[in-house]
Each structure stands twice: as C-alpha cells, then as structure tokens.
Image (cartoon, coloured by chain):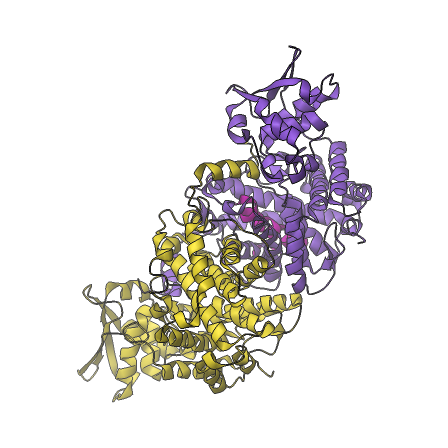
Chain colours: A yellow, B purple
Amino acid sequence: MQADTNTTTNANANAMRPSHEGAVTRALAGFVGALRWSDIPPDVRHEAKRSLVNYFAVALAGAHDPTIEKAVGVYGRFRANERATIVGRNERMDMLNAAALNAMSANVFDFDDTHIPTIIHPTAPIAAALFALAECRPMTGEALLLAFVAGVEVACRIGNAVSPEHYQRGWHITSTCCVFGAAAAVAHALGLDATRTAWALGHASGQAGGLVETLGTMSKSVSVGNAARNGLLSALLADEGLAGPDAPLEGARGFLKVVCTQPDTSRITEGLGREWALLSNTYKPYPCGVVLNPVIDACLDLRRDARWTLDDIESVELLGHPLLRERTDRPGVRTGRESQVSAQHAVAVTLARGKAGLAEFSDAAVAEPALRAFGSRLRFIDDPSWPVEAAQVTLALRSGERIAHRVLAARGSLAAPLADVELVDKLRQLAAFGGSGVAPQPVADLLWKLDTAPDAAAPMRAAHAAR
Amino acid sequence: MQADTNTTTNANANAMRPSHEGAVTRALAGFVGALRWSDIPPDVRHEAKRSLVNYFAVALAGAHDPTIEKAVGVYGRFRANERATIVGRNERMDMLNAAALNAMSANVFDFDDTHIPTIIHPTAPIAAALFALAECRPMTGEALLLAFVAGVEVACRIGNAVSPEHYQRGWHITSTCCVFGAAAAVAHALGLDATRTAWALGHASGQAGGLVETLGTMSKSVSVGNAARNGLLSALLADEGLAGPDAPLEGARGFLKVVCTQPDTSRITEGLGREWALLSNTYKPYPCGVVLNPVIDACLDLRRDARWTLDDIESVELLGHPLLRERTDRPGVRTGRESQVSAQHAVAVTLARGKAGLAEFSDAAVAEPALRAFGSRLRFIDDPSWPVEAAQVTLALRSGERIAHRVLAARGSLAAPLADVELVDKLRQLAAFGGSGVAPQPVADLLWKLDTAPDAAAPMRAAHAAR
C-alpha cells in the first residue's frame, strides 16, 4: 500500500482509538507525580536501600570488565562535561554517558538484583540514571530514594503486564521495561507534573529495545546502558516541553500491544500504592543461575566441617527439581561465563575452595584440571515434587560413607533473603574483586543513611576511584 | 519461573541454535564489507544523489520546527565538541548529536523520501549519520555515496523481510530498520571487515525501537534521531572491538523473529548486488499523504488556466480508488498536520492558491474561513478499478459548466518520478520555507558532483547557517 507513515497512522489511529484512551498512562503518570515519601512503607524504604547496596557492589565488580573498558573508550569521546562519576573508575562524564556506563557495569556479570515475577534486573538502569542526575542537579537522599521506588514500580508493573510472553519472545525485559522506570524516576526527581511525566513515558516508549539474542555477548550491555541513558533523556525532553502521545502504553500501537499479543493492562494500575514491586526484589549470593543457589548452599555447608578432600569423593548426587538438571547439566565448560550455569563446575569448585564468588566462576577457575576432571563424578536425580529453590547434595566417599545435606530455601530467595550484613559483605568482596581501590565500607555507610542525607550524590563521590 | 536471564538465555539459546545460525547476518555483513563503487550501477549512483538533494531540502525545511528547537535545547547541553553541522542552524555539535538532530529535522514533516515496498523513509537517519561522520573523519564523496547505498540496501532489505506485518503491528519501521542501515553505512565508511560489520548489526539489533503510537506527536522524532545516532554508535563500538551475537537478525531471539511472527528471511539476501532498494525510492512533491498526490496534481492543472474563482465553484467531485476517501475524507481539520491528510483542505487550498507547499498545509492556512467553508462542497466517488496513484477532479461551476481533469500517474510516484530539476526546486522552496538563510543552489551543485568530491562534508558546510 503506497500510503506514507503519516496517512496510515492517522487513519488507523483514529479508527482504533477509544475515547477513554490514555487512562492507564494517565493513572500511572499521576501516581508517579503525586508520590510522596510518607506514602512509602518502612519495609519498602529499607528494601530500596538494600537494592542500592547491591547495586554499588555489582557496579564496583564490573567497573573494569573488558566490555566496560571498550564502552568507556567510545562513550568517553562524547562526554560533554565531567560532572558525573563512573563507579569504580577515575573518569568522570556528563550525566547521560555516566548513566549508561554505570548501568552497564552493574549488570555486566548478571550478578545484580532480580524482580522475581518478571526476571527484571531493575536497579542497574534506574539507579544509574538517578545518581547521574543527582551529581549534576543536587537533591536530597530522600528525594533520590523516593524517585527510585517510583521508577522500580513503573518498570516492574509494565513488566508484569507483558510477562511471561515478552521475555520468552526474545525481548531483554530489563532493557525494554527499565527505560520506562528510569524515565519515571527522573521525572519524579525533576518534579514533573502528571502530563509531562506521561510525555516522558511516551519518549521512553519510542526508545524501548533490547534483545535476548544479544545476551552472553558484549552487545547485551548496550541496551542496558540505553535503558538508563534514554530514560533520563526522556524525562529531560519532557521537562523541555517536548510533547508525547496520550497512550504510549495501552494505545492501539502503544508499547503493551506491540510487544505482547495478550498484555494484562490491569497489572499496570492494580494495587498502585498498596503493593510494592521492591518487596519482590532479590539479591544473588553467587554469580550463577539461581537454580544453582541451593546446590551451592549445600556444598558450602558440607565443606565447612569437611573431613575429606576432593579426591576422597567417589561421586556426588544432586537431588532436586528437573529444572536443575535441564538448566545446569553442563560438563566440560570452557569459559567462566558458561561455568555460571554448570552444576558440574559449581559443585567441584565450591567443594574444593569453600567459596563461590566471581573468582570461582572465572576463565581461570574453569581451566583447573582437578575441577574439570571432577565433573564426571556428578549424578542428577530428578524429583518434580521439589521446589526450584530447594536441593539435596549427597557425597559418596571412597570409604563407603555417605554424607547428605538438604537445603529447603536457598540463600537469596524471597523465603531466605540475604541479610543486610550479607549484602555489605557482597559489597566488600565485589569491591575487592573489581580492583578499583574504592573503600566499600564508607559507600555502605552512606547508603544505609541515605534517607537522611542532604546530598544524594555522596555515595557516588565515595565510589570514585583515585586511579 | 525463578531463573535469571543468564540461565534462561544460555539454556534456550543452546537448545534452539542450529549449526548454520548466523549465515544470513554473515551474508549481509559480507556484502556490505565487500561492496565497491564499481559494483554500483549508474542509475543507482544517481538515485543516491537524488535522495541526498531531497534530504537537504527537508532538513532545511525542518531546521527550526518547534520539535527541533526543543531537541536542540536538550541535546545541545550534551555536545562533546562542535565539529558537526546541524543543517540550517548555526550550532555545531559532536557527530552523535548531529546525526540525531539532522535525522529529526529531515523527517519532522514526513516530507522526506519513501521506499515504496516498505514505507521506510531511509535517507534521513542514514545520511544524517554518514555526513556527521564525514565532518569528523574526512572521506571522499564517493566513499560517502557508496556507504549510503550500502546502508539503504541493508535497512530496506530488513524492512522487506518483516513487511507488512511489522509496521501494521505498530513498529515505526523507519526507526526500527534504519538503525541497521545507519550502522551498516558507517561500518562501510569506517572500513570494518565482515565480522565487525556483523557486530555493528548486533549492536543495532539491541537498539531497534520506535512506535507508530508516537507518530503525529513531537515524540516521533526521538526514535528517528536514535536510528541515526545509535546506528553510528553501533559501528563505533564494533570498531572498538565490542563483540556482538552471531545471528542478531535471523537468530531464535534475533530481530526478525522478535518483531514479526512470519519474517521472510530470504528477502535479506535474495538478489544482493543485483536488485537495489534505491530504485524503489520516491520523493514527495507535496507534504501530504501520497494518496492525495494525483488530486493535488489535477487541482494545480485546473488552476493553471482558470477562468473562475473559488466562489464560482458549486461543487467538486473526486473520482478515485476508495482508499482516497477512506484516508482523506476529513472536513473541518484544525491543524496543519491534520490538513496533510484532508482532501477537503488540499483541494480548497490548491484551487485557491495554485500552490501546495508546506505553507499551504500550515496551521495558518487551515485557519482561513474561505478554505474551511469550501470543504462542504467536496464529494467522493469511489471506483475500485482506479490505481491509488490516479484520480479525476471535476469542478461543477455555478454557471453550469463542468471542467474535469484526470491524472493517471501522480507526480512523485515510481511511474512519474520527480525530475532532477524538480528536486532542486523542492530544495529551493523548502530552504526558503525553513528560513535558515542557507543558499540552496550551492548545496545542490555540491551534491550533484559529490561522487568526484575529495571531501564528502562540503555540502554540510554549505548548509551551515550563519545565524
């Protein structure tokens, strides 16, 4: 059909646009515009701080990953000023570039937080956008935390409306939904009214992108960085008066219908202000696929009072949900990245070292002959009656002795969330792993009292690397 | 399912990835990497120049549109340097911001070119990216033209593979496909090999976005600008060594399958090097939905030797394909933008003024009482046997006389393309409309001999506004 975009659009849009169109976007934007600190329950306020402690941990870990080094090399050529910190590095950049690079480094190891219902990693893009803004436009810690809560709510509610189809189809849901979250968060921080907040969501709708096909490659980080950068840009454009569509979410050709055949639009507004996405947010204790968490827990416990060495073990039985085997039965992996989803490597390295950090899932660890050889001694036993967050590990020793350990709720699951002290320990370990020289404790201390801090940017200054 | 992205991806990707995966992306990237000027037929070379003349015309027209003014206000805060020209303006910016803003202004009126099979407007994003690069990295005119041909080929072939479903679903195909085109064009201009060109396409795949829902609002321009900027960025990242996926196009979770349920992947590679997308590119004579072109042609011819005034006309009959009525029967429009798809306004203003330029489809023109009143005198007569590029306009005068004029192939259609002189005239008119003070003739002269120019950036310098 030889009609140009303009013709086609108006015709179709008019034909398909009901009079109430825009109600969902208006309701969500209105919620964001009106949200006050007094509306946020204490447990949600605290979860926001926990998400930020985990965020700085993973950002410090990724700061010098090869992907980030290359991205800094290119993005750095286009920095307009040096007002915003790159976590764990000594370069500074303008807020748009800093938002992109900090979101990338916080997500590069897939070790950041996970909103369980959607598998969205919400904090990397949303926190990166807000802290970059805070370094260039002073705001209180309370203002940043409130904007962060609003942004996570928007990203995860949009994710709920298109899940599970959206991710299964091949959309990297962290990137596609967090551009809205970052836009909403920055819109709140800028004090935009409901109309301009809706415009910001409209500009975000035209910038939503990111494909699962890119995961496992350096390319993944580009769309994660864009979610932060373009969400921030969307709010700045709305603040400037750049107008958007009425119904970027629920419209006939809006985000929800275009990226999902059967979106549940009610999930956007249902329970707004009563149910909080942050309460379904979790933090990984290990840099692995989460189905491995109970197995690693069990191996760490077995190792604690070990009267055996790896050589004494004849075989290891893993009893758990079939998904454990389906997702992690990978002997002979060749890279650290593959090892993050290999039960053979996870069991061997954890029993051998009594640790399961990024160093245990690196290319170097995978190359150890003893660990590679051990894989053949692993056996899976499926039991569909087990939940995925549970597993039993049984060691059969050459002596004939059998030692079993059962974990019913893996560390880091909603049933057994990491304690605050464990999050700080993760921050300490990942700061050391990242090698930035940034002292982790001051960052943690500033984050725990962020709600009373006059300057929200203080943790970023503490995360600046001298060299 | 409580699996994190990492687990899910690796599991699914491995399960679903055939061994030949990546063949389509490799073939397309290989074509781009190997393309030489001697491979380009003369008519394709000339069409590339015609597309660029039309590009500068529409960019000069849009340079001071309110959308562009606001975008310059925000993007300008983030300019790293002032090495690239903003067409028709006196600001200069870094290449990424210039690419975005020039693509926006060239497309803001939907008066840019149209690749008929896909409705893609290819030149705005692709030319904007290449000229921005050329101002910062010297290249010959031939090198830019060759990269432009490659980029248009990539964008339109990807568009062919997902059409018509992709656009109908709600994707703004100009934005979603031209990010690949800009990436491929810049990859060629940078001399990237096939592997890095494929990486650039991979980075583009994660940045493809843009919704039809945003059309008709300022928000549309954001994704069009991104197509240019992010395509350019994708190639720069690939040049830096940032690696991408093997099959960003045809992969199980690659672009084609994610944005289209039944992509025709063969359209990506079929006839590569033998069939050229630029030969299906067209240029609008009027800033209207293309179905109005034959009507406006007829009205201009009727007006030429008019022995009547608007008041002498009792009624006007429009005979044509039913689509003409369906798309353009819009009496009483209120904005210039609406008037671009209103037969009532188009007929009235063209018969009254004997012109059909941007000024005739402005808010001011729409406000004229005489034109508003005339709309009621219009009648449509459907005849499905007529092609959409044809129409007959019959004037019934109060004297009883009837004057009919029939147009079989509208100006600007593939059957009656605008002549080179008409494109230059469009450039002259739109340069005047844009009010930039830029002299159009030197720009046209430089473009017609671009293939022999030592410096591809010369037309950009000529398009820089003194004030």
Residue B296 location (% of width, % of height): 65, 26
Q: Is residue A19 visible?
A: yes
Residue A342 location (% of width, % of height): 35, 69
Tell me where the magenta segment starts and ends, as one range.
B172-195
Q: Residue at x 65, y 73 (%)?
A: A82
- Residue A396 sits above or below residue A257 on the image: below
Quarter of the picture containing the N terminus of chain B is bottom left
Q: Residue at x 59, y 72 (%)?
A: A137
Q: Nearer the viewer, residue A286 or B192?
A: A286
Q: Quadrant of residue B2?
A: bottom left
Residue A259 location (% of width, % of height): 42, 50
Quarter of the picture containing the C terminus of chain B is bottom right
Residue A302 location (% of width, % of height): 26, 83
- Residue B122 sits above or below residue B384 on the image: below
* Majority secondary structure of magenta residues: helix
Q: Quadrant of residue B237?
A: bottom right
* B184 magenta-colored: yes
